[in-house]
Amino acid sequence: MKIKNLYIEEEILNNKRALKIEKKLKYENKIICKSYKEIFNPKNQNFRIQKNETSIILATKKKNLILKAPKKFSIGLRENYYFSHMLNCIYDCNYCFLQGMFNSAHYVIFVNYEDFFLNIKDILNHKSRNICFFSGYDCDSLALEDITGFMDFFLNKFIELKNGILEIRSKSTNIKSIKKINPSSNIIPAFSLNPEYSIKSHEHNTPKLINRLNAIRELQNLGWNIGIRFDPFIWYGDLCDMSLFFREIFSSVKKNKVHSVTIGNFRMANNYLKRMVKINPTNPYILEKYISEILPNRIENSIKPKMDKIKEKISKFVDESKIFVN
Amino acid sequence: MIHIITATNPEAKFFINYLKLKKINSIKEFQIYFNDKFSLTISGIGKINSAISVCTTYHELGKIKNNCWINIGIAGHASSIIGELFIINKIIDSASLKNYYPYSPNITRISQLSCTTYDKVDQKYSDSLSDMELSGFYKTANKYSYRELIHSLKIVSDNRQNSFNYDEKDKIEKMFEAKKKHFDIFFEKVLKIWSNNITDQKKINLKIEGLLSKIKTTKSEYEQMKKLLTLIYLKKINFETNLFKSKTDTKKILSNLKKIIQ
Ligand code: SF4
């Protein structure tokens, strides 16, 4: 993989995993830093300019490795956490909140994978009920797997955890690490889907819908239960066509091997949206969203269908108890 | 626009001649030169002078945010050969021990290196270049521009074998002249990044400010109109600019703009 610069924290210069990752990268300059925050956190950086030529920062995550998930973020369990072994993503979705949340577009890879696992284990040790952990909140779980090898390390270990459920959310079709292990009921590979025209215009550099569906089928054929995520669901066509779209989706996958379906609209904290407009004022999609925030009566181009209507349509294919509105 | 900041006259001389810059005689605090694409300010030695010179340049040249800023100058290094040019990719402030990481374009024929800014002349030399301005320049320029638009180029003027002689002013100019082609490539790249990411937005902003200057608005009306007009220009929707007349009711303008984009 070709990147601009490789930044590395001085304390992991000789870390085996960092060295392994470094070998897979082609970079112009290797720059040593004290902490990833020196590069990642300063204000007045331009996420969009960096996105044209990104760098990788190898670091360790010291605090807050596993965080409580927002209340509505759930696939049916009462207690939910999230974690990210990486910050940022190789894809470039118009609606991605990371552009508003982070000052920098560089990819930070936290190499202390063991600590993520130990933290999860520690949380589970104190609980008796099932707890869900979402991977890929601040990144895409699988997109950079060939470089990070995180899932390769993690899945074998997680499979042993009795009351832990892991959701691996992704738009990537890089499913090698999942195929290496036997299907397990406590690991849920989950794929985000949208109509192909929305993918083309809003989910830049991501795999096509057909390829995502192929990846889902491939894993289902191996015995995996798959999560399907329409979140955010971006629909421009008319509502009757939406039923056709869902028919197409659910006829391409094995319905009895669908673990859950989640649906959600575009939503973003106003301060993130404000920042996105500031750094990317020439993106009509973001500006339009922003204007609809400040002028709520304005009708948007994309139809914002009611979530319960979408749920109703999906429930023709999947049992209602498996559908969650986020 | 690119704002160049150099510490001394000999470091500036080559650029003033090469870029055909004219002096702005009305500014007394610093010598500032300019043409339509570049400005050059001679800051004097030290990080405080450098910081003030950035601030003055910004205020004197129209307070325009997100222009490009480049600190160019000479620096010492333990072993690099005299006359070698570097792009700086890490700045270490020796007093505060704070680090900054400029995000400059890679150019095949120019190596990259770190530079340490000292408060006093550094006689020890190390593997990091040494100067007396860069951290002050960078921190201040970052108040007015994105990090990706702030850069530094340094030419090695002295090393452990060859100490620096301030009297050899012509030699400094010649060192810069010898790297003319490299500067050209660097400026071109920097301007390309700037124009690809910033100028479109600036053109639209200028048009909008032109329209909004004709009417009286509250702060919130101004912001709303600005966003709506940006979207209208981005979507290339034709509209009647006659709307913006001093006596037109601002509520009417706002409601018209909303109609236009619906
Ligand atoms: S795939 Fe997810 S994390 Fe990546 S850019 Fe798109 S929304 Fe952001």
Image: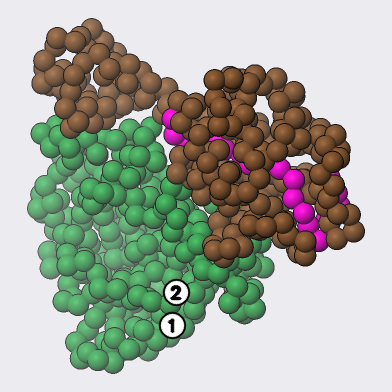
Type of the residue with mark 1:
Asp
Q: Is residue A264 left or right of residue A196?
A: left
Q: Give the residue pinned by disc 2.
A: A61
**Residue B156, percent across and down?**
79, 49
C-beta proximity under 8 Å, tags 2 and 1: yes
Q: Residue at x 39, y 55 (%)?
A: A102
Q: Secondary structure at mark 2?
A: loop
Are callouts 2 and 1 both on one chain? Answer: yes
Per the rendering, the mark at residue A115 is 1
Q: Is residue B67 magenta?
A: yes
Which quarter of the figure has residue A63? bottom left
Q: Is residue A240 left or right of residue A256?
A: left
Is B184 or B232 nearer to us in this picture?
A: B184
Give the label, 2 or 1, closer to the camera: 2
Relative to B181, is A103 above or below? below
| Chain where mark 2 sits | A
Type of the residue with mark 2:
Lys
Q: Colour of chain A?
A: green
Of callouts 2 and 1, which one flags the residue occurring earlier in the amino acid sequence? 2
**Residue B171, percent across and down?**
86, 38
Which quarter of the figure has residue A61? bottom left
Q: Residue at x 26, y 54 (%)?
A: A231
**Residue A182 seen:** no
Q: Is residue A236 left or right of residue B110?
A: left
> Which range of residues does the magenta coloring cover?
B63-84
Q: Colour of chain B?
A: brown
Note whether ligand 1 is within 8 Å of mark 2: no
**Residue A45 seen:** yes
